[in-house]
Image (cartoon, grey):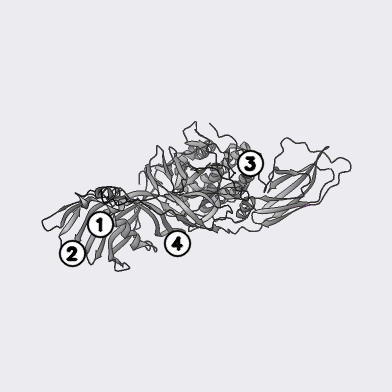
């Protein structure tokens, strides 16, 4: 089932409509032509002005891009003599045409060509403040019932089992969600509820999704303030099929000076704020081909709505706030760095218009991407257009303008084919990594968008094209990149020491991904896996070694593992400087120990916490990360290793010393299965 066309509300800031099926005639007698001009006011906006035409009851504004046919973007009232058009970032040359509408018909007033200045991103950056953990209220002391005054979970007969950390309740929720899909939901202290629906096929392996509500955002550029926002983790992780985030406030509200509900997102790591399209939460449907749930894409740009939603392509911070039309237009001028986020902001800004404007806006976006694609040759350039095209599809662009979309998909398939043909499958150049990533997405065809790309590619290039694809995905040119970790971290204090030894029981599979703007330094290898404790023990000063009998598993998501290339464009090194770690310890159960006759622990079952490896890893390697890897094998499999021998950090406030002995290994294999 396809989603219904968006129904947008009229705003005071942008009053537009679109006329269909009009016939152009000459102006009736007595109607005079007026001057018409277009002038770029920024890299993303053009101011149009004209002199009034006698007898005009309205005006139609058409746009043409670099030889493409004109199409209508706006229709304005007869007493209006100016209009500001917001264009997709990156567009350079535009021709506008003004048509006057009178009782007798229509006639062209004039055309005006404009070249926009070069685009220099000018993002708004914000600081996201999360809710702090809450403390479980303690019972009021009652002298007549002292046992009733004990903390929840405290057993006076076994005080050693009580875990004080159980009194701290984190303001977050987490669920492990696999390829079959699932849901995670959390309610913040301000009673705003956030629900993330992850569709089937969104992830290829079980992933721990975490929602953490946001208390405030410093620098939020919305005059009416924050309605609600949530951090979706793992941050920066891209989904194969978009997920749906629903934000439910306890009640509706009204703000006369900021009457709009404005959707936004904050980019992972760069913390750039940008507008994000909204979807209705009145109900969801499913793709007939099983491509995951679809939201009704009607936005809710009204501050009275208590429930809104967003379609998410990956982890990050998302929310809504109360804004004015002026807020929206000011933010539209502050262009984010990432090309996909540029498309999202442009499409979100266009939501504050009449329903007919959506088709015109997406037509403008699609043609801009088509022109951009024509000049895309390198892996970076093709990946940039892929990012824009995916966001265009996520904003429902493929539901309109069938002819344009066919051209977009045909052109994109041709660019992928050229890149795959040029790639030698050596796994050591940036083009190799981009080609392998795009080939895997076509082969998987997880989302409706990639299904269409795959169908177009196979229809256009047939058996020969499929053979190229198969070779890169599962043939002799396939690249398999993995990360292995073996690490021992020891914490030594004046009271004793604790030691944790971990390893990756299964190598973490790394795949090419793009983080932020497409530049030579923005490509990363992203992977999700875990390290398992193989040894965990501690020793108090006057006691023998205590062995821990419950080993935790620590999930690890590589959010910032960056390949670095030499002057010839070949892989030369790595920077591992971003990660998300999560332990499987539960903090609702205490520590169980066994003691000898001297009162020393012989063994411990740390159900209440104690994952010292994660904390030690972060303290040892933040903020510099793991750099300067040794290229230890230059024949396949290629091996890069980073070794630490007695690498130490002295902790502040006499908290002790951390020491690590470890080997981190990145292996690059070729051929079926690596």
Q: Tell me the residue that label 2 is attached to.
A: 541
Residue linked to disc 3: 9
Mark with earlier residue (1, 2): 1
Looking at the picture, does residue 417 appear above or below residue 45? Answer: above
Q: Secondary structure at mark 4?
A: loop
**Mark 1 and mark 3: Cα distance apart in space:** 58 Å
Q: Is residue 327 left or right of residue 440?
A: right
Q: Which x, y percent locates residue 578? A: 40, 57
**Earlier along the polypeptide chain: callout 1 or callout 4?**
1
> What residue is disc 1 on?
500
Q: What type of secondary structure mainly makes up the magenta span?
A: loop
User: Magenta span covers which residues?
Assistant: 33-37
Distance from Cα at disc 4 to Cα at disc 2: 51 Å
Which mark sits nearer the N-terminus, 3 or 4?
Answer: 3
From this viewpoint, which residue is outermost toward the right?
30
Separation of residues labelled 3 and 4 (CA atoms): 52 Å
Instruction: Give the mark nearer the N terminus: 4 vs 2.
Output: 2
Mark 3 secondary-structure assignment: loop
- In the picture shown, does residue 560 fall above or below 28? below
Mark 3 or mark 4, which is nearer to you?
A: 3
- At 31% from the left and 55% from the top, the residue drawn is 485
Give left or right: position of 564 versus 666: right
Q: Which residue is mark 4?
A: 566
Between 521 and 159, the residue placed more toward the observer is 159
- Out of 251 and 61, give the one closest to the viewer: 251
């Amino acid at each position: 089932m396809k989603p219904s066309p968006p129904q947008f509300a009229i705003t005071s800031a942008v009053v537009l409509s679109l006329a269909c099926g009009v016939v152009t005639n000459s102006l009736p007698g007595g109607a005079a032509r007026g001057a018409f001009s277009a002038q770029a006011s920024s890299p993303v906006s053009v101011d149009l002005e004209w002199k009034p035409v006698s007898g005009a009851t309205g005006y139609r504004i058409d746009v043409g891009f670099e030889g493409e046919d004109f199409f209508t973007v706006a229709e304005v009232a007869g007493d209006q003599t100016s209009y500001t058009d917001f264009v997709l970032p990156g567009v350079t040359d535009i021709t506008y045409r003004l048509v006057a509408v009178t009782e007798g018909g229509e006639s062209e007033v004039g055309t005006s060509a404009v070249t926009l200045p070069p685009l220099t991103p000018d993002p708004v950056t914000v600081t996201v403040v999360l809710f702090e953990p809450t403390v479980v209220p303690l019972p009021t002391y009652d002298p007549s019932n002292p046992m009733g005054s004990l903390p929840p979970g405290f057993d006076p007969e076994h005080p050693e089992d009580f875990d004080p950390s159980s009194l701290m309740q984190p303001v977050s929720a987490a669920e492990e969600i696999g390829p079959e899909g699932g849901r995670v939901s959390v309610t913040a202290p301000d009673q705003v509820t956030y629900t993330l629906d992850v569709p089937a096929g969104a992830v290829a392996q079980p992933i721990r999704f975490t929602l953490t509500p946001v208390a405030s955002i410093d620098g939020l550029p919305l005059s009416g303030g924050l309605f609600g926002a949530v951090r979706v983790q793992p941050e920066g992780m891209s989904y194969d099929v978009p997920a749906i985030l629903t934000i439910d406030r306890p009640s509706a509200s009204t703000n006369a000076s900021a009457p709009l509900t404005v959707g936004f997102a904050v980019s992972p790591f760069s913390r750039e704020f940008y507008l994000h399209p909204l979807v209705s939460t009145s109900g969801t449907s499913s793709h007939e081909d099983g491509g995951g749930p679809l939201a009704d894409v009607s936005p809710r740009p009204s501050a009275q709505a208590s429930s809104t939603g967003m379609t998410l392509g990956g982890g990050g911070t998302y929310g809504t706030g109360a804004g004015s039309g002026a807020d929206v237009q000011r933010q539209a001028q502050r262009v984010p760095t990432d090309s996909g986020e540029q498309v999202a902001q442009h499409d979100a800004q266009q939501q504050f218009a009449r329903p007919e404007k959506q088709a015109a806006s997406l037509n403008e976006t699609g043609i801009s991407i088509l022109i951009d694609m024509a000049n895309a040759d390198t892996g970076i350039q093709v990946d940039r257009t892929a990012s824009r095209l995916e966001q265009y599809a996520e904003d429902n662009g493929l539901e309109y303008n069938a002819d344009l979309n066919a051209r977009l998909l045909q052109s994109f398939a041709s660019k992928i084919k050229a890149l795959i043909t040029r790639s030698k499958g050596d796994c050591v150049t940036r083009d190799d990594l981009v080609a392998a990533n795009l080939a895997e997405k076509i082969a998987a065809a997880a989302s409706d968008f990639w299904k269409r790309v795959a169908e177009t590619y196979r229809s256009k290039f047939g058996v020969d094209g499929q053979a190229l694809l198969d070779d890169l995905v599962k043939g002799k040119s396939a690249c398999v990149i993995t990360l292995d970790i073996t690490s021992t971290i020891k914490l030594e204090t004046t009271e004793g020491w604790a030691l944790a030894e971990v390893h990756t029981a299964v190598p973490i599979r790394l795949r090419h991904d793009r983080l932020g703007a497409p530049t030579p330094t923005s490509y990363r290898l992203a992977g999700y896996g875990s390290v398992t404790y193989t040894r965990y023990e501690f020793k108090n000063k006057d006691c023998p070694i205590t062995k821990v009998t419950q080993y935790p598993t620590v999930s690890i998501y590589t959010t910032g593992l960056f390949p670095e290339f030499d002057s010839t464009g070949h892989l030369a090194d790595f920077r591992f400087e971003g990660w998300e770690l999560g332990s499987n310890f539960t903090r609702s159960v205490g520590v169980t120990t066994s003691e000898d006759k001297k009162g020393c622990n012989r063994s411990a079952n740390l159900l209440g916490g104690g994952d010292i490896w994660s904390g030690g890893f972060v303290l040892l390697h933040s903020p510099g990360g793991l750099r300067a890897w040794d290229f230890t094998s230059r024949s396949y499999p290629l091996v890069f290793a980073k070794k630490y021998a007695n690498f130490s950090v002295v902790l502040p406030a006499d908290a002790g010393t951390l020491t690590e002995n470890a080997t981190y290994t990145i292996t690059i294999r070729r051929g079926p299965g690596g």
